[in-house]
Image: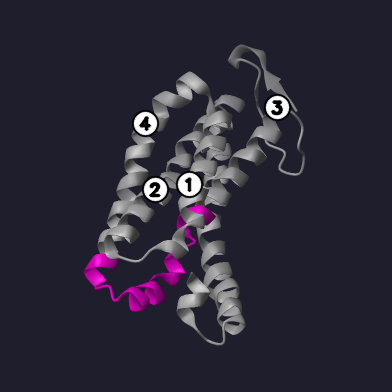
Amino acid sequence: LEVDPLQDDRATEIKLCIFTRPHMRAFHCSWWSFFVAFFIWFAITPLLSDIQETLGLTKQEVWRSSVVGVGGTILMRFLLGPACDKYGARTLFTLILCVASIPTALTGLVNSAAGLAILRLFIGIAGGTFVMCQYWTSKMFSDEVVGTANAIVGGWGNLGGGVTQLFMGGIFFPFFKIIFNGDAEMAWR
């Protein structure tokens, strides 16, 4: 991979089908980590109508939980920018993905509107990984290709949200409904 020594040995080209260190490996780890973050962040979304029915929530309570989740993302993005400067993207990516996976795994324990809002606040921190995704890629690619690199890793990472909708709403949730004899509450829990 060609690098520019005047730009801290950043790559001057993007070769999507290779995984050489450090540039293309960072590129692929960045988009894949962001993809996983979107999977975590959006996993609950296709289940919300069943969660609403099970818990007897109003549309406003579900909407409020969504707003709180986005609020968590916005707050984390403000905090993660300076943290990337201090600790780097890899460490923070790992930390945020691990931390955000915990409330995602605890989704089945939610029993109230407040519980759902708090859960989605902590799941929402996964959306803050956009900062690390862009930071990491910007550190690896030169001015000539960094915009393209950032667009690709951001786009492929965002694809995680769509794949999550298909997987959770079209495969995983229906599969568990079959296992639990059509019981939607047991399936989402």
State which quadrant residue 178 falls in. bottom right
Quarter that holds the N terminus: top right
> Is residue 142 among the parts visible in the rendering?
no
Which three-letter amino acid code belongs to the residue tagged 1? Ala
Q: Is residue 127 left or right of residue 101?
A: left
User: Which mark, residue 122?
Assistant: 2
Please give the name of the residue rendered at 56% of the width and 25% of the height, measured from the top-left corner. 139
* Nearer to the camera, 107 or 38: 107
Q: Which residues are magenta?
A: 39-62
Q: Residue type at mark 4?
A: Leu
The residue under label 4 is 79
Residue closest to the eye, 77 or 68: 68
- Say few, some or many: other residues with alpha carbon within 10 Å of mark 1 (under 14 / 14 to 19 / 20 or more): many
At mark 1, the secondary structure is helix
**Which secondary structure lies at badge 2?**
helix
Left or right of residue 181: residue 5: right
Q: CA distance from mark 1 to mark 4?
A: 15 Å
